[in-house]
Amino acid sequence: MNEFLKTWSEAAYTSIGFFWMALWAFILGYILSSMIQIFVTQERMQKTMGGSEGKGVLLGTFFGFISSSCSFSALASTKSIFKKGASFISSIAFLLASTNLVIELGIIISIFLGWQFVVGEYIGGILLILICWVLIKILQPKKLVENARENLEKDNGNNSSSSKNWKREIVKEQSWAKVAKKYKMEWQMVWKDVTVGFTIAGIVASFIPDSFFQTLFINSGQGTTDFTFWEILQHVVIGPIAAFLTFIGSMGNIPLAALLFGKGVSFAGVMAFIFSDLVVFPVLRINAKYYGWKMSLFILFLLFTALIGTSLILHYSFDLLSLIPDPSQVKIKDSEYFKLDYTFYLNITFLLITSYLIYLGFFKRKDVEHEMNEMAPKSKLLERVMKYAAFICYFWLLGGLIIKYLII
């Protein structure tokens, strides 16, 4: 019993330490995302993406890069852009970029996994788009695209907003109050995923033995980056399955990805795990609601195929250039998370900025209203489960801290 309590306290401390390491990056990322969404309207995106296919793909990738990393927000924005006339591949490019190329995700990855994974994430995001483009060119799913557009005609939602000059808007206090309200919405969208994700990461780090990962991922945990092709392929296929079983969003999954790499899973397997946020059941269901089941399954096939190809290309390219990092560089336990270093001062700085945004948006300028962007329809049951899971996580973390500092 005493051993369990000790491990519980370690798990809670590790979870909170993980979150403390990433806090400033979350705040910076969501402030940038909120600014972009306020000052760059979706109407402007829709107008510029309706031209040639090549230009549409480039613009879709760019607008995805500067958008929110929330999968549900990305799904709704993709639907709106596609409905307004963007090509299918341009819409897919936007979807992939908004969940793989966003700024805040790169910052979080750099903290937990290192610069090689950041490079892999951004190059991989572009590869995902290019492979999907090639597959669409080869398969020519014209009938599916036509049916998807017809299905969207039944949706009378209006997600457009007035186009304004961002240079004039950025100096207005009213606009920054809107940024504050959008910043609050960003946290409302992810708090459950982040809470559950970081708590699970601490539990896995403390309770799950290495033998489990060695069984799940063939030849992992041997302190080597030298895998056969079939071992790497198995890791790439199992990675998305693991993501499916722990679906908590791309941001909350990063500490879990760090755990997998620290346990000896291949570079390709970890990248596949990170890329898997769009091949899970909630996303499949939402796409089916928007476009019909045939198109939803086609998108699943498209993204899963691109994910496998991208992960393999990244692994062997990085291996050829001797850029695959050493798993020992990932330190997931027994760290001094709360020492006075750059993380501490960055967290304090960005918490002060958050305090100012709260004051501006919800006290000084309560009169400012912010039009909410459309969100993909979440499962009420799943949201309820995640909400209760998050509250259970808070009790778990609090209990672990009480045990660590008051009992043991």
Image: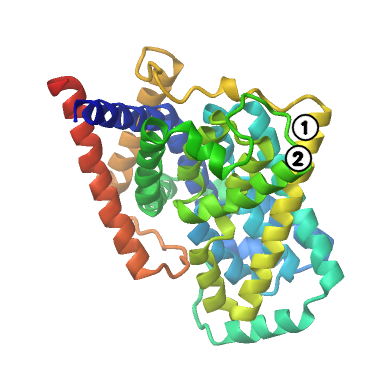
Number of labelled discs? 2
Q: Which amino acid does label 2 sit on?
A: Leu
Question: Is residue 10 placed above or below 357 in the rendered structure?
Answer: above
The outermost residue toward the right is: 138
Task: Identify the element where label 1 is drawn.
Answer: helix
Image quadrant assignment for residue 5 = top left
Please state, as top left, top right, bottom left or bottom right, where the N terminus lies in the image: top left
Name which residue lies at 40% across and 18% down: 335
| 228 left or right of 45 in image | right
Please state, as top left, top right, bottom left or bottom right, where the C terminus lies in the image: top left
Q: Distance between the residues labelled 2 and 1?
A: 6 Å
Query: Circle 2: is it few (<14), some (14-19), or many (20+) Cα within 10 Å?
Result: many
Name which residue lies at 52% across and 48% down: 250
Using the rendered image of the protein, determine whether residue 255 is visible from the camera's viewpoint: yes
Name which residue lies at 40% across and 54% down: 189
| 391 left or right of 224 in image | left
- Marks 2,1: beta carbons within 8 A: yes
Residue 170: where, in percent of width, then height?
51, 44
Task: Identify the element where label 2 is drawn.
Answer: helix
Residue identified by numbered label 2: 314
Residue 299: where, in percent of width, then height?
66, 68
Image quadrant assignment for residue 49 = bottom right
Query: Circle 1: is it few (<14), some (14-19), or many (20+) Cα within 10 Å?
Result: some
Q: What residue type is labelled 1?
A: Phe
Q: Residue 9 versus residue 170: which sits nearer the camera?
A: 9
The outermost residue toward the left is: 406
Q: In the drawing, what numbered circle is on residue 318?
A: 1
